[in-house]
Image (cartoon, grey):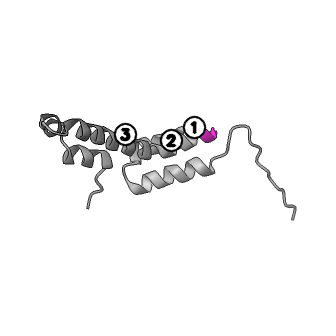
């Protein structure tokens, strides 16, 4: 079973040509269509926003994984976790040396 991206699903369920051709309520449907697409895009890019907001050291990793593998739930969750647990720039890492 393939996982269908939300944006692709929205584009196939609500074709823009049928929305524009309706005579009554077409403007409302266009507004709802673009609101749903922009909302889905916002949710899709949440890991990238978190990585940039937290200003982690290697923010390219979660952003690239989010863009290319975010359509799968696993890729989206991995990039979100990486964005939250990544080290911030300038953050010191405590290392404890244990002598045996």
Numbered disc 3: secondary structure: helix
Q: Residue at x 31, y 49 (%)?
A: 5
Q: Is residue 62 left or right of residue 67?
A: right
> Image quadrant for the C terminus?
bottom right
Q: Main secondary structure of the magenta part?
A: loop
| First-in-chain label (3 vs 1) | 3
Q: How far apart are marks 1 and 2 (CA)?
A: 6 Å
Res 72 seen here: yes
Residues at discs 1 and 2 in contact (Cβ within 8 Å) = yes
Numbered disc 1: secondary structure: helix
Numbered disc 2: secondary structure: helix
Q: Residue at x 50, y 46 (%)?
A: 47
The extreme bottom residue here reads 100
| First-in-chain label (3 vs 2) | 3
Residues at discs 3 and 2 in contact (Cβ within 8 Å) = no
Residue 29 in the image: above or below residue 80: above
Residue 85 on image: x %, y %:
62, 51
Residues at discs 3 and 1 in contact (Cβ within 8 Å) = no
- Mark 2 = which residue? 48
- Mark 3 = which residue? 38
Magenta stretch bounds: 53-57
Question: Is residue 54 within the magenta segment?
Answer: yes
Res 58 seen here: no
Q: Residue at x 74, y 42 (%)?
A: 91
Question: Is residue 3 within the magenta segment?
Answer: no
């Amino acid at each position: 079973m393939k996982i269908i991206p939300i944006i692709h699903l929205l584009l196939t369920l609500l074709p823009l040509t049928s929305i524009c051709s309706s005579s009554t309520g077409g403007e409302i449907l266009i507004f709802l269509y673009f609101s749903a697409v922009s909302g889905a895009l916002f949710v899709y890019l949440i890991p990238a926003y978190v990585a940039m907001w937290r200003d982690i050291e290697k923010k390219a990793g979660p952003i690239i994984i989010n863009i290319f593998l975010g359509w799968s739930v696993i890729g989206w969750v991995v990039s979100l976790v990486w964005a939250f647990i990544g080290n911030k720039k300038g953050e010191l890492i405590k290392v404890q040396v244990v002598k045996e």
